[in-house]
Image: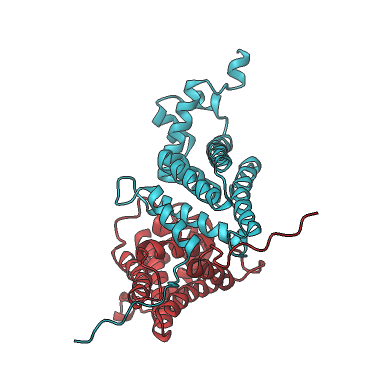
Chain colours: A cyan, B red
């Protein structure tokens, strides 16, 4: 056994393939309802061969959720760093997230479902940290906007939660190839949240009677 | 066998008790991971006795989801009917929903989880109808607000989805007894959506230099 195989080097194509299969199954059936046997069968390998890469389901859970969160986090960090004003940073954060959801839907759904699933509390320290960093970044952009005077003094945590709720629920109802792309939905959400629904121009003129 | 027992009269206390146990288990473990045996054991009855009320899991799914959606729908319909302007109706709809979530959390989580779960597509016609009626009512309130000039001409379906996303995600993170009651979170969401985040008063005065 070489050093390379014992450390499960990320360049190992077989491992990537197994992770991809696990994501698909977790996204389709849910984490709890997917067994290591299901994954081995889908990959057409023996359970023993699968154990070599993932000795138990917890390991796989960590890898799927952590990889998902880490990729998302680095994408939004990059997008936010490139934007200039706090409002633009909020927009960049949500757009990068929607892009990530659209491009890697299995990963998103598997990560999101597994993450919230009751009982999966044992080994999720790093995933939790990534999620906290992700949520904190959005709150910080909102808080910066309040400090600069661009945004009203709302609770940044609550405003962030509303936007992330809109994003996360999209994994449940939004289908690629539908009327609106994920980015277009997010743009409409941002328009509503940033501008509000209230019509400050006053009601339209009363139409003439019959 | 009497007519009463074959129709499973709603006044039957045993049936209510079994539904309550099913809701708790579905909310805690998820619909897929809960077996009829789990429910029979929790209720301390035989599987045969359980079958008398619920011949299979689909029946129970329908009853849990349909009961949950029907109760919610009639509550929001009442709240909306009592409010006067479209904006007040939107507010009443969301507040009644938050109240329902807070008071019957198991029912909400069980209904929400089971509803979205992949594979549960066979027998959910009536539950789907309730959900459509529920979503449609909110959209109609928003559309009425746009027609009356109270609200900006946004897409009512997208604005409704954003508010319902905020509401639905609360079942994942909001805990009774925390800093904010469900109603208080919803009030802040409504404030953000109805007024927007953008500060129209302009930035604060530049603070004096050091």
Identify the residue shown where x is 51% and y is 46%.
A92
Residue B44 appears anywhere in the view: no
Q: x, y (%) of residue A88?
A: 53, 49
Q: x, y (%) of residue A191?
A: 44, 58
Looking at the image, residue B163 lies above or below residue A47: below
* Figure quadrant of residue A69: top right
Give the camera-side residue of B2 and B99.
B99
Tell me if A138 is positioned left or right of A105 in this view. Answer: right
Residue B64 appears anywhere in the view: yes
* Figure quadrant of residue B81: bottom left
Give the camera-side residue of A184 and A33.
A184
Tell me if A104 is positioned left or right of A135 in this view. Answer: left
Outermost top residue = A2
Give the camera-side residue of B147 and B179.
B147
Outermost right residue = B210
Quadrant placement of the C terminus of chain B? bottom right
Identify the residue shown where x is 46% and y is 69%.
B18
Outermost front residue = B209
Identify the residue shown where x is 58% and y is 17%.
A5
Q: x, y (%) of residue B47?
A: 43, 61
Looking at the image, residue A118 lies above or below residue B2: above
Quadrant placement of the N terminus of chain B? bottom left
All told, the count of numbered labels is 0
Identify the residue shown where x is 42% and y is 53%.
A187
Give the camera-side residue of A90 and A1.
A90
């Amino acid at each position: 056994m070489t050093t390379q195989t014992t450390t499960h080097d990320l360049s190992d194509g077989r491992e990537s393939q197994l992770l991809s299969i696990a994501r698909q199954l977790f996204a389709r059936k849910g984490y709890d309802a997917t067994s290591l046997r299901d994954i081995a069968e889908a990959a057409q390998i023996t359970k023993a061969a699968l154990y070599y890469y993932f000795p138990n389901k917890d390991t796989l859970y960590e890898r799927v959720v952590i990889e998902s969160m880490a990729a998302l986090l680095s994408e939004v960090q990059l997008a936010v760093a490139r934007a200039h004003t706090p409002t633009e940073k909020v927009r960049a954060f949500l757009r990068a997230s929607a892009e990530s959801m659209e491009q890697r839907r299995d990963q998103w759904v598997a990560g999101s479902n597994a993450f919230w699933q009751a009982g999966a509390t044992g080994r999720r320290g790093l995933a939790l940290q990534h999620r906290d960093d992700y949520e904190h970044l959005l709150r910080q952009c909102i808080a910066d906007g309040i400090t600069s005077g661009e945004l009203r003094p709302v609770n940044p945590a609550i405003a962030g939660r509303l936007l992330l709720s809109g994003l996360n629920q999209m994994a449940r109802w939004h289908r690629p190839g539908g009327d609106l792309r994920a980015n277009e939905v997010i743009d409409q959400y941002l328009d509503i949240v940033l501008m509000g629904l209230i019509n400050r121009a006053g009601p339209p003129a009363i139409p003439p009677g019959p």
